[in-house]
Image (cartoon, rainbow, N blue to C red):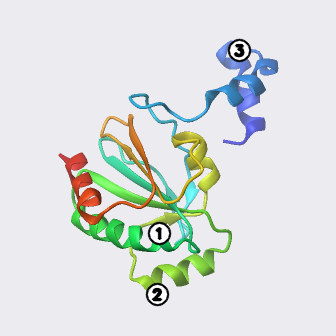
Amino acid sequence: MKRRDSLLALPALGLSPWLAPRAMADAGPAAPGQPVAWPTGAPLLDGRPWQPVAGQAQIVVIWSTTCPFCKRHNAHIEKLHRALAGRAAAVLGVARDRDPAAVQRYMAANGYSFPVTLAWRAFAAALSSRNVIPLTITVDRQGRLKQAIPGEMFEEDVMELVSLAT
């Protein structure tokens, strides 16, 4: 939703539009245990809009094509993505890049098939104020933030995230 649209909707909710800029700025990312206010309709690289699936846990990884730690980490994330197929959890990559074609080439060159969006600012605003990559964020099946894990993870630690699907 555009900021203008959300300001116009405030009077219908009994709120003053003059308080909105402060309220929006104070909202910030979810804290552990709090529900996540997902950015909706973020475009994936294939053009489809991303939407969280109700009752499905999410593993969101914020990364960049220029980060060598992200490249190793994403190899484990790809393995996790494949292990979660048909289960109650999903992976979403959030690339901090601007060129979708470059990200698509990077994904193809590395054999990655997990869905990716370039809407990193919106996801960072909803999930974590940490400015580190890779950043792995887990959200439980009820839509509550579990944790934000900074930095590269070992394969066995990434694969333990399969437990979110149970």
Where does residue 8 sit, x and y in percent of width and height? 76, 28
Which residue corresponds to mark 3?
Answer: 15
For the N terminus, the quadrant is top right
* First of labels 3, 2 by sequence position: 3
Regarding mark 2 in the picture, which secondary structure is present there?
helix
Q: Which residue is mark 1?
A: 69
**Mark 3 to mark 2 CA distance (whole Å):** 50 Å
Sequence-wise first label, 3 or 1 = 3
Q: 135 or 53, which lies in front?
A: 135
Residue 3 in the figure: left or right of residue 51: right
Q: Is residue 79 above or below residue 49?
A: below
Amino acid carrying label 1: it is: Phe
User: Do the numbered discs 3 and 2 sit on residues whose CB atoms are within 8 Å?
Assistant: no
Decide: few, some or many residues near mark 2? Use Cα within 10 Å; few <14, some 14-19, many ≥20. Answer: few
- Residue nearer the viewer, 149 or 125: 149
The amino acid at mark 2 is Ala
Residue 127 tag number: none
- Residue beneath disc 2: 109
Choose the circle earlier in sequence order: 2 or 1: 1
Left or right placement of residue 140 versus residue 95 in this view: left
Residue furthest right as drawn: 18
Q: Position of residue 3 (x, y in %)?
A: 74, 38
Q: Residue at x 64, y 51 (%)?
A: 121
Name the mark nearer the viewer: 3 or 1. 1
The answer for how far apart the CA atoms under marks 3 and 1 are is 45 Å
Q: Quadrant of the C terminus?
A: top left
Mark whose residue sits in front, 3 or 2: 2
